[in-house]
Amino acid sequence: MSSASTIATNTSGQTETGTSGSSISNNSSTSLSSTEFLNLMMDELENQNPLDPSSSDPTQYLTELAQMTSVEQETDTAQNTEDTAQAQSVSQAVGLIGDSVTYTDQSTGDSVTGTVSSVQITSSGPTMTVNGVTGVLLSSVTNVTQQDSSSTTSTTTDSSDSSDSSGSTGSGS
């Protein structure tokens, strides 16, 4: 196996002879995972020189560890909150199956009333099918009339008119 010899100068200006090599790169990741960071920190702490404390600052590692832990916890909390909100939206939409709803048609702006027959769970949240019309957003519902054999309960949500914000409840047999 032959390798080409190269001549170069080092940072001190001295001539050096060596062989050319190839570079190695890691394309998989540019950041450390928490496990890799902990392993690196333990190696550094095990190999530090106790007579020369300036060679490494163990408090810097602990500060970085605390920051990394904090960011991981905040990320987990945000993901859990998002998952909970998604589950609540799905639960609310499924609870409307069989009920009569009035919603604002997103394309025309008209109020449309119909019965919820099914719920579709999409990446952007739940949508409902009302009287054969798919893709009705839960947020576009302005009135719900619960269909129950013993009583009927109606709840109205109207953000534009505060004078008629009360829901009516009636019972009949």
Image (cartoon, helix red, strand yellow):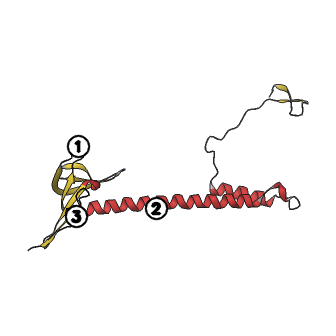
Rendering coords of residue 52 (x, y %): 87, 58
Mark 1: amino acid: Ser
Number of marks present in the image shown? 3
Q: CA distance from mark 1 to mark 3?
A: 25 Å
Residue picked out by circle 2: 80
Quarter residue 48 falls in: bottom right
Work out which quarter of the rendered image holds the N terminus and state it.
top right
Rate crowding at label 1 as few (under 14), some (14 to 19) or many (20 or more) other CA atoms within 10 Å. Answer: few
Answer yes or no: do the residues labelled 2 and 3 have beta carbons within 8 Å? Answer: no
Residue picked out by circle 3: 165
Rendering coords of residue 27 (x, y %): 62, 40
* Lower position in the chain sequence, tag 2 or tag 3: 2
Which residue extends farthest left? 173
Rate crowding at label 2 as few (under 14), some (14 to 19) or many (20 or more) other CA atoms within 10 Å. Answer: few
* Lower position in the chain sequence, tag 1 or tag 3: 1
The secondary element bearing badge 1 is classed as loop
Depth check: give the residue in front, 133 or 47: 133
Q: Residue 107 vs residue 33: left or right? A: left
Q: Which mark is residue 107?
A: 1
The residue lying at 61 percent from left, 43 percent from top is 28
